[in-house]
Image (tube, rainbow, N blue to C red):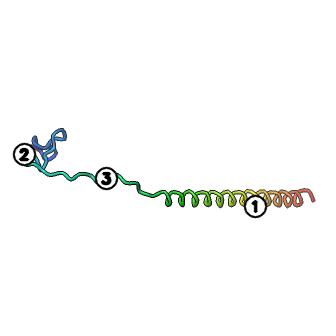
Amino acid sequence: MSEHEIPSEQTPESPVDATASGESVAVAEPPAEEPLFDAEELAEFDRDDIAAGGNICRMLAFFFFYTVIVMVISCLWTYHVVFK
């Protein structure tokens, strides 16, 4: 057998498992599903999300207004330099 061959008892189709000896293994039941967050926390997330959205909107409006002001100033300066 070459070093790149998979042994016959460990093929990808039939991996050797530690429980293959026939011993039974006890499996624990998963914990009961409980919500990650309670109603108060979800309401707080909603309030925080609304506040963050409002702040982002204000910042975007400010940056747009700033860009328009800078564009007008640069257009007036260019007109003054070219045509005067």
Q: Which of marks 3 and 1 is in front?
A: 3
Circle 3: residue type: Ala
Q: Which residue is drawn at 62% across and 57% down?
A: 53
Pick the residue in front: 63 or 5: 63
Please give the count of numbered marks on the rendered protein.
3
Q: Sequence-wise, which precedes: disc 2 or disc 3?
A: 2
Q: Identify the residue shown where x is 61% and y is 57%.
A: 50
Q: In which quarter of the image is the C terminus?
A: bottom right
Q: Residues within 10 Å of mark 1 (few under 14, many from 20)?
A: few
> What x and y, as percent, mark residue 65?
76, 58
Determine whether the residue tagged by mark 3 lies in a helix, strand or loop.
Answer: loop
Q: What element carries label 2?
A: loop
Q: Inspect the image, locate mark 2, and give the three-letter code of the amino acid beneath it.
A: Gly
Is residue 57 toward the left or the right of residue 19 in the image?
A: right
Q: Residue at x 53, y 59 (%)?
A: 45
Q: In the rendered image, which residue does mark 1 sit on?
A: 66
**Residue pictured at 83% horizontal, 61% vertical:** 73
Percent position of residue 78, x then y? 84, 58
Q: Up-down: is 11 above or below 54?
A: above
State the separation of the CA atoms marked 2 and 1. 74 Å
Spatial separation of the CA atoms under disc 3 and disc 1: 54 Å
Q: Name the residue under label 3.
A: 32
Which of the 4 image quadrants contains residue 14?
top left
Percent of width and height locating residue 40: 50, 60
